[in-house]
Image (tube, rainbow, N blue to C red):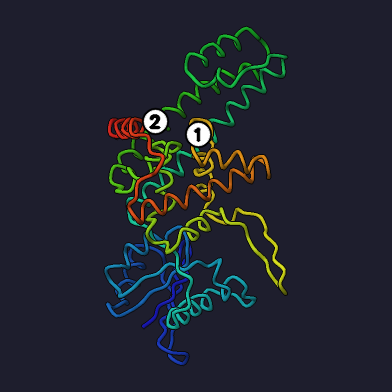
Amino acid sequence: MFVGVDVHKHSLCVCYYRSAKQYRYQSYPFTEHGFQAFLDSLTRRDEVAIESVTQAYYLIDQLGPRVKRAVVVNTFAFDLIRRSRAKSDEKDAFHLAQQLSYGHLPEVHLPERTIRDLRVYQNARVALVEERTRLKNRIHAAFLMHGVVTARKHLSSRKGREMMRRESSRYGGYPELELVALHLDRIDQVEEQMGAIERKMFELGSHLPDLPVLLQVGGISPLLAITILAEVGDFRRFPRSSKVASYAGLVPSTRSSAGRAKSGRCGYGRKRLRTAMVQAVRSLTVHEPENPLAQHYQILKARRGAGRATIAVARKLLEILWIMVTTEVHYRQLVPRLYETKLRRFKTAA
């Protein structure tokens, strides 16, 4: 039997489907007893499809041992639900079950538990980085309102922040400068929280077998390597290097008709993976200017501008990583001393 589940915060709408003429609906409250009743209604021969929702991982973990197969559906790519005009919970569940029986559902890749945990920590760290950036911008703006130009390096260390604190205390009666001390305190708290999260990420990263491969590239630090692996999951699940580049949103869209082709913008993919590859390219071009990728970047920059050059080299670097992982070849521009230093620092942090 094929089972489609339309998931809500407080309820489950389930369609039990055998054929176009044999199906039935059942609703369950999303409570401990209601969910258990739904699980008890399933057998080892059933296949289940659920929408990609917040509870998807939890549902898959619970369903996996009880059914033949459980899949998560990409509803953005499933037009029967996304573009339906007569939309209801029962119809959504029916479409999920019916298309599951046909084998036509666009499934979502389910990463292993380590990758899922890393993504949780990665999301939390990104939120803290964004908060720290907002606080720093407020501090710079507060001083600029009174004609004082501050440098970014003043907020990059505790010593510099203490100097900024003393500077702000000289201006009495201005609320924006009185708040600087609170912003500085919050920056200290944020960086402590980021340190705790990064230690967790290093601990989980020690279980990633492909991490030493990525560290061979000069522009990739241990934290950046963990970020890339957390976003990609397993490089080997992509049949070609162009597939992982497309997954990252580093391949321009193409429209062709009647012998005419037009390339569009990049950006339809995993934003954080794309950002991580851009960071790797910028680090590589600054610290290893003799690297062939850095030289290729300079050529493209002169022809097409820095933005397009960065994206093009980021794609090439990601495809190189795919080749290194899947074929187990070493990075040709490997610097042994730098590589050993990164491995040593990672082991110390983990």
Q: Secondary structure at mark 1?
A: loop
255 relative to 193 in the view: left or right: right
16 relative to 303 in the view: left or right: left
Tell me which residue sits at (58%, 28%) in the image.
135
Tell me which residue sits at (65%, 76%) in the image.
85
Q: Quadrant of the N terminus?
A: bottom left
Q: Quadrant of the C terminus?
A: top left
Category of crowding for the residue at label 2, using alpha-carbon neighbours closer than 10 angstroms: few (below 14), some (14–19), many (at least 20): few
Residue 328, x across and y down, in percent: 32, 52
Tell me which residue sits at (55%, 13%) in the image.
165
Q: Amino acid at mark 2?
A: Gly
Residue hosting label 1:
290
Q: Amino acid at mark 1?
A: Glu
Residue 140, x across and y down, in percent: 64, 22
Residue hosting label 2:
195
Residue 193: image tag: none
Distance (Cα) linking label 2 and label 1 = 33 Å
Nearest the viewer among 33 and 314 is 314
Nearest the viewer among 130 and 168 is 130
Earlier in the chain: of badge 2 and badge 1, it is: 2
339 relative to 133 in the view: left or right: left
Q: Secondary structure at mark 2?
A: helix
Q: Is residue 166 positioned above or below 253 on the image?
A: above
Category of crowding for the residue at label 1, using alpha-carbon neighbours closer than 10 angstroms: few (below 14), some (14–19), many (at least 20): few
Residue 53, x across and y down, in percent: 47, 61
Numbered disc total: 2
Nearest the viewer among 308 and 169 is 308
